[in-house]
Image (cartoon, grey):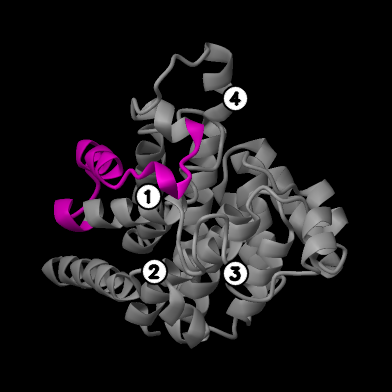
Amino acid sequence: MDLRSKFRGALIGAAVGDTLGMPVEGWSLKKIRSELGEVKDMLEGKKRPAGKWTDDTAMTIAVAESLIESKGFNAEDMREKFIKHYDPKRGYGRTVKVSLGLMQREVSEEERSRIARHNGAAMRIAPVGLFYYDDPVKLRQVSYESSKITHWHIYAQEGAALQAYAIAYLVKAEAGTLKQSDFLARLKEFVNEDAYKEQMRKIGDLIGESRNKPKIVKKIGNNVEAEKAVPVAIYSFITHCECFKDTVLYAVNLGGDADTIASMAGALSGAYLGVNAIPEGWRNKLEDAPYFYVLSDSLHQLKMSQHKAE
C-alpha cells in the first residue's frame, strides 16, 4: 500500500473533481443532457478557465494547511486559514460567508437553520480523513469540531464524518479488492443519524441501476444538503470504484451541486486508487497543480513522523 500515492490521490482527486463539476454547478440533469449531452472533460466555466477550482478546493487547502502547521486539529487556526483563503470569486456558499462574518447583511434565523445543514463541511474534509485514517474515534471528533466552525447542523457534521471515514477506509484498502457490500456495511455501522443509515440502505438497493441517472437523483439526491450530497458521491464512487475517470464524470453528469459532489467522489476514488489513476492531462491542467503534491506529501510526512514518535 503506497500511502503517499493515496494521500496525493485524495487531495488531487478532490480538486480535479471540483474543476470538472465547476462549469455545470447548479445545472439540472436535464439541462446537461440537452445542452452538452454529457460532460466528458474539463470545460471552461462562466468566467473561469478549465482547471480552475472553486471554494471547495480553497477550503480543502485551508484544512490541510492548518493540520500541517498545527500538527493536528486547532479550531482557531483552521478558522483563520478559512478567512485567509477566502476569495469571493471562488463561489463561496452562504453558510460559510455567514459563519465567518463575511456577509454584508443580516440573515434570518430561518435561513441560518436551513443553510447550516449544507455540504460545505463535507466538501473540505478529505485532509481529516487522511490524517486520522487509523483512528476512527479521533476522526469523528475532528470531523465534528472542524464542521462546527461553519456548519452547526448535525446532518452537516455527520456528513463530514461519513465522508472522512469513507476516505480513511479506502486509504487502508488495496486497490482492486473492494467489496461493495462490506464497504457499505462499514459506512452504515459508522453513522449515527438514521437519515444517513437510510441513504446507505438506498445505495445498496440501487447498486445495479447506475445507468438510470434520473432515478438515482430522485432516490438519493444531488443538491446542497449534506445528507443528499455525501451519499450520492459515495454512490458515484462505489458503482465505478475501479476507474477514477468514470467515478468523477458520473458524479458531474448527475447535475445539481456538481462541483462538490464530484469533488467528494474524486477524493474517495483517489484515496482508493492512488494518484496515478487520475488522468495525467487532468492533473496537469489543474490550477496550481504542483502545490497539491507539496501539500499532500507534507500531510503524509507529518503523519508518518507521528507514527515513528509513537
Tell me the tag on residue 59: 1
Q: Are marks 2 and 1 in contact (CB under 8 Å)?
A: no
Mark-to-mark CA distance, 3 and 4: 31 Å
Q: Earlier in the sequence, mark 2 or mark 4?
A: 4
Tell me the tag on residue 114: 4
Magenta stretch, main secondary structure, is helix
Q: Is residue 182 visible?
A: no
Front position in the image: 110 or 139: 110
Mark-to-mark CA distance, 3 and 2: 13 Å
Q: Which residue is mark 3?
A: 43
Mark-to-mark CA distance, 2 and 4: 32 Å
Mark-to-mark CA distance, 1 and 3: 22 Å
Q: Residue furthest left?
A: 309
Q: Is residue 48 left or right of residue 61?
A: right
Q: Name the mark nearer the viewer: 2 or 1.
A: 2
Where residue 178 sits: x, y (%)? 61, 77
Amino acid on which disc 3 is placed = Leu
Say which quadrant the C terminus sits in: bottom left
Q: Is residue 253 left or right of residue 92?
A: right
Where residue 6 sits: x, y (%)? 41, 76
- Label 1 CA crowd tier, 10 Å (few <14, some 14–19, many 20+): many
Span shown in magenta: 68-94
Residue under the point 52% across and 61% down = 18
Q: Earlier in the sequence, mark 2 or mark 1?
A: 1
Amino acid on which disc 2 is placed = Glu
Q: Is residue 117 left or right of residue 77?
A: right
Residue under the point 20% across and 58% down = 68
**Helix, strand or loop under label 4:** helix
Q: Earlier in the sequence, mark 1 or mark 3?
A: 3
